[in-house]
Amino acid sequence: MDKRNSLLRKCRSVLAIAMYAVRQRIVSPRVICLLIVMTVYIASRLSFVEEAVRITGLRTNPMIFTFITSDVICALIIFAGVVFLYADAPFIDRSQPYVIIRSNRFLWAAGQIIHVIAFSAVYFLALNLITAALLLPHGTFATDGWGKLIQKLSVYEPGLCVVFL
């Protein structure tokens, strides 16, 4: 029973270290600036949707982040944002030596690994929500045919589809 409590205590410590790092990172100027830059980039990538909706008369689903990231250049720019997020990879600030002393190096490193995984998920979730927010005026959540605009662009309007994808 003592071994189980020890393992549970270690898992709690790892999660506490990870959540502390995520909370510290979310409010950093680096993240805020990156999200602003990515919002402008995604808005420029989706600028043609208004014209496509006007021309075709169809609406699209606002959750099309996966379609815009299928382009190699777009994926490179979005993953460059990930590199920018983790450029200061040891994540050592003035409080980290105290965290390492209170836990140990192994638990701190495990917490940092979980922090990277969790914050990467938060980053991509934020980009997905930004895409959805930008497409809300031109989108629909109806389940019957939300992909018709994408299908029509890919079949009948290849010029617009190239810009889109």
Image (cartoon, rainbow, N blue to C red):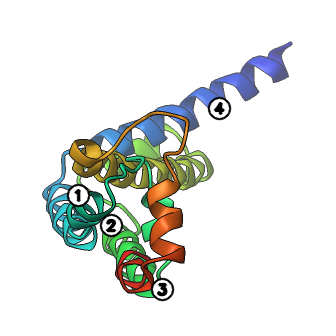
Relative horizontal placement of residue 110, taking residue 76 as reference (left or right): right
Q: CA distance from mark 4 to mark 3?
A: 41 Å
Q: Which mark is residue 155?
A: none
Instruction: Read off the residue under disc 1.
Output: 31
Amino acid type of the residue tagged 3 in the rendering = Val
Mark 4 touching mark 1, by CB under 8 A? no
Relative horizontal placement of residue 118, taking residue 43 as reference (left or right): right
Instruction: Read off the residue under disc 4.
Output: 10
Spot occupied by residue 94 in the image (x, y as percentages of width and height): 23, 53
Q: Earlier in the sequence, mark 1 or mark 2?
A: 1
Instruction: Read off the residue under disc 3.
Output: 72
Spot occupied by residue 72 in the image (x, y as percentages of width and height): 48, 85
Q: Secondary structure at mark 3?
A: helix
Q: Is residue 31 above or below residue 144?
A: below
Mark 3 touching mark 2, by CB under 8 A? no
Q: Dividing the picture into quarters, in which one does residue 37 lie?
A: bottom left
Eye-nearest disc, 4 or 3: 3
Q: Is residue 62 above or below residue 20?
A: below
Spot occupied by residue 74 in the image (x, y as percentages of width and height): 39, 79
Q: Earlier in the sequence, mark 3 or mark 1?
A: 1
Q: Is residue 140 above or below residue 28?
A: above
Q: Earlier in the sequence, mark 3 or mark 2?
A: 3
Eye-nearest disc, 4 or 1: 1
Instruction: Read off the residue under disc 2.
Output: 85
Amino acid type of the residue tagged 4 in the rendering = Lys
Q: Earlier in the sequence, mark 4 or mark 3?
A: 4
Question: Residue visible at 28% across and 50% down?
Answer: 135
Q: Secondary structure at mark 1?
A: helix
Image quarter in which the C terminus is found: bottom left
Which residue is nearer to you in this view: 125 or 33? 125
